[in-house]
Image: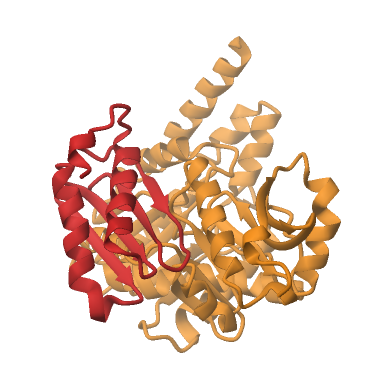
Amino acid sequence: MIVPTSDVRFDVISPADLPGARAEIAALLAASDLDVDGSIETFVVGRSAGRIVACAGLDHNVVKCVAVSQEWRGESLSLRLATEVVRLAASRGQFHLFLYCPPHNRRFFKGWRFYPIVEVPDVVVLMENSPVAIRQYCDALAATRRPGRTIGGIVLNANPFTLGHRYLVERAAAACDWLHVFVVKEDASMFSYADRFSLVAEGVSHVDRLTLHAGSDYIISRATFPGYFLKDRGVVDKSWAAIDLLVFREYMGPALGITHRYVGTEPLDPATYAYNAAMKIWLEQTPSPAPPIVVVEVPRTMVDGAPISASTVRDLLARGDFTGIGKLVPATTLHFLETEAVQHESH
Amino acid sequence: MKVIKEAIAGTLESSDLMVKVAPGTTGKRDIVVHSEVIKQFGAQIRRVVADALDKLAVTEGSIVVEDKGALDCVIRARVQTAVLRGAAIADFPRNALS
């Protein structure tokens, strides 16, 4: 090493500055078989004599696209990079961070004090920067555990809550001793998490033997959906579902004693269809330290010959067709949508 | 002193440590220490962390220490800084820091 690592200066590259640095970052990542991930908002880069020799990307609370130039490895430069990323995230109010890496780099990121959560063998490991967070989460879940032989689990985005969701919940509850329902927390949908959650709560309030759980970073979130660093996009698609499902099987499942996961059949959306197919693989069939969770597909409710879908409701809403919406959603959701529409107009 | 928000102090580099504090959920002080020298100095590190927290009268909150072989004085300084950031205190209680 001719230049000491103390000469490397760290810098934050904002989205506005990214175009200028993108080619250089892409070249550094390419040397480590990584692509620039489109969802990254900000990069931390280390420069020596103006040249980028280390980088790490941050997408909200997920660290990705980490690389150190070959000739700078073995000098602990990455630990300074790690510190800069953690600080950058902290300055944005993100303290609970996740990270994806290939399994052979697991040890490396342990030095960053990231701890493994689940691994898709030979493909990817999901890690988080806390030695206790997922255990604490599971402990809190376990406090709501209920006895029974058949314990069901459902994860809903409910964007917004429809009669289809209600039918799924009712069917599952009828087949189970207890049913645990989770609402996806990520605010990446048309309706906010708070609105989606309260519509689900109202829509399932008549169902006995049911616990409604707040969403978390561990269920269908930005953190459990990678889709970035692997060259082969087919592998990416496979692993995003796998990670999310393995977290469910290895953590939520044992914490609550979930034996069955219920899901609606998916005739319309290809991404959800693929996710349902992946469920059977990762929850039931793949060998795992956690017991298998049986996947039960409940046929979609049909109205006027078409399956009920939240996306149809959103389309009707865009056209202001409340008569059409009324056929697909419970009164509570309809009331919410009408009130929202009135407020939009008055603004 | 009460930790009212999440905060960090320190680095992940060798001979340093990173301290993360967060408001408590259990009503008590929840300290987790990870160290590369836990076998040799684990008890000593815990003592220094507990002492620094005692002096700041921190009775509840989550404190995670990721140690990379730091000296006691560094551990104390990082814990103090993380707590002061997490307590969002402008007035520096100097007599509690010695």
At horizontal 34% and vertical 52% (from top left) the residue drawn is B78
Is A64 or B18 nearer to us in this picture? B18
Residue A186 drawn above or below residue A127 = above
Residue at 54% x, 77% y: name it: A108
Query: From where the camera sits, is residue B59 visible?
Result: no
User: x, y percentage for residue A221?
Assistant: 52, 55
| Chain coloured orange in the rendered structure | A
Q: Is residue B38 left or right of residue A11?
A: left
In the drawing, does residue B15 fall left or right of residue B30? right
Residue at the location (68% across, 69% down)? A68
Which residue occupies the foreground of this view, A182 or A162? A182
Q: Determine the image quadrant of residue A35.
A: bottom right
Q: In the drawing, does residue A90 fall left or right of residue A289?
A: right
Quarter of the image where the N terminus of chain A is located: bottom right
Farthest bottom residue in view: A287
Seen as rendered, the residue at the extreme top is A346
The percent coordinates of residue A195 (x first, y second) are: 46, 35
Picture layout, residue B64 above or below residue A310: below
Residue A214 shows up from this direction: yes
* Side of A217 where A269 appears, left or right: right
Can you give x and y, in whole percent of width and height, for residue A266 in the image? 61, 62
Q: Position of residue A147 (x, y in %)?
A: 18, 68
Position above or below: A46 against A149: above
Residue found 33% across the figure and 57% down from its top: B74
The answer to which quarter of the image holds residue A133 is bottom left
Supply the letter of whichever chain is red: B
